[in-house]
Amino acid sequence: MEAPEQRWERRIDALLGIAASSLLMVMMLLTFVDVVGRYLFNRPIHGGFELTELLLLVLIFAGLPLVSHADEHITMDFIDRFLDPRTRLGLDRAVHACVAALMFFMAWQLWIKAARISSYGDTTDVLRVTYAPFVYFSAAMVALSGLIHVYKAFARK
């Protein structure tokens, strides 16, 4: 039988994976329709480029917690083979703690930037979509990634 913590982890992974896959599908369809409209009918989608940019931002930051949870960040493991298992575990925990601290710092800075963008009322040029919610979303996803790294730093292995 599966442990309860593994069950909720798999559910969250599945939810984030479905969200990321859906965003990628929407981007693909948007690009396809835009290209077909542009070259066959000389009628591209109004603001299609802006929509693609915003969807890409959401896709990248929605994928960050998935990458953090699956330990799929780029790593250099050239020193691991020289360490005994206990030291390697300590190093892994220290790295997760450092990454968590950096993620929280980045989330804090993104939140400050989002507040500034919100106060200016910045929008995209063509569709006039407000940028602030997207930057707040980015900050939230970076903070969630930080929480994942805190969990990994202190989880039993």
Image (cartoon, rainbow, N blue to C red):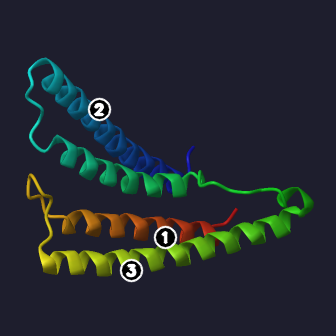
Single out the mark in the foreground, 1 or 2.
Answer: 2
- In this view, the residue in front, 75 or 128, is 128
Q: Which residue is mark 1?
A: 146
Single out the mark in the foreground, 3 or 1.
Answer: 3
Q: What is the three-letter code of the residue carrying label 2?
A: Met
Q: What is the three-letter code of the residue carrying label 1?
A: Gly
Single out the mark in the foreground, 2 or 3.
Answer: 2
Q: How far apart, in angstroms, are the residues tagged by discs 1 and 2? A: 30 Å
In the rendered structure, the answer to whether residue 152 lies left or right of residue 92 reads: left
Q: At numbered mark 2, what does the secondary structure look like: helix, strand or loop?
A: helix
Q: Which class describes the residues within 10 Å of circle 2: few (<14), some (14-19), or many (20+)?
A: few
- In this view, the residue in front, 71 or 138, is 138
- In this view, the residue in front, 32 or 91, is 32
Q: At numbered mark 3, what does the secondary structure look like: helix, strand or loop?
A: helix
Q: Which residue is mark 2?
A: 28
Q: Which residue is mark 3?
A: 108
Relative height, residue 80 to residue 96 (above, below):
above
> Residue placed farthest to the top in the image?
40
Give coordinates of residue 103: x percent, y percent: 49, 72
Q: What is the three-letter code of the residue carrying label 3?
A: Trp
Q: Are marks 2 and 3 in contact (CB under 8 Å)?
A: no
Relative height, residue 122 to residue 53 (above, below):
below
